[in-house]
Image (spheres, helix red, strand yellow):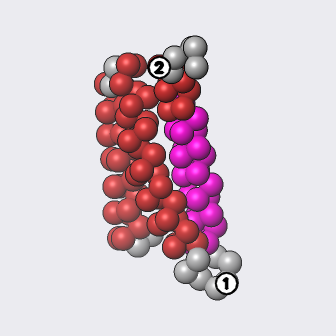
Amino acid sequence: MSESLIAALFVFVLASFTGFEVINKVPPTLHTPLMSGANAISGISVVGALLVAGLDREPSLTTALGLFAVIFAMVNVVGGFLVTDRMLEMFRSKGG
C-alpha cells in the first residue's frame, strides 16, 4: 500500500473514533438541533461527492465511492430534515 493511502486510512479511523466519542457525549436534548446544523455539512458533502463521482469519464473505484458518498450523504440530509420537521411540529399550535 502507498503511504498516502495508509495516511488517509489513519485519518479516517481517527475521525471515526473521535466522531463516535463526541456524539456519545452530547445529551439527547441537543441531538435534534445539532442534526439540523449538520444538514448543512452533509449538503457540502453531497456537492463534494458529486464532483468526485463526475471526475472520471470511465467507471472506476473513484466513481463508485463518489456514488456511495452521494447516496449516504443524501440519506443523512433527508433524515435530518425529517427529524427537524418532526421536532418543529411539536412546537406548532394545535388550533391553527
Residue at the spot 38% in from the left edge and 62% down from the top edge: 8
Disc ID at residue 91: 2
Residue 68 picture quarter: bottom right
In-image side of 22 versus 77 (left or right): left
Front residue (pair 91, 24): 91
Q: Secondary structure at mark 2?
A: helix
Q: Is residue 77 left or right of residue 23?
A: right
Q: Residues within 10 Å of mark 2 (few under 14, many from 20)?
A: few
Residue 71's place in the image compared with 27, above or below, is below
The numbered disc on residue 58 is 1
Check disc 2 and give the amino acid type. Answer: Phe
Residue 83 sits above or below residue 47 on the image = above
The residues colored magenta run 61-83
Q: Is residue 5 magenta?
A: no
What is the residue that sits farthest to the top in this orientation?
95
Alpha carbon separation for disc pair 1 and 2: 50 Å
- Of residue 66 and residue 86, the one placed in the foreground of this image is 86
Q: Residue at x 46, y 51 (%)?
A: 42
Q: Disc 1 marks which amino acid?
A: Glu
Q: Is residue 37 left or right of residue 47?
A: left
Given residues 77 and 6, the one toward you in this image is 77
Residue name at image x 50 percent, y 32 percent: 84
Residue furthest right in the image? 59
Q: Residue, x 58% and y 51% (percent of image)? A: 74
29 or 18, nearer to the observer: 29
Query: Is the residue 8 above or below the residue 87 in the image?
Result: below
Answer whether residue 82 is magenta in the image. yes
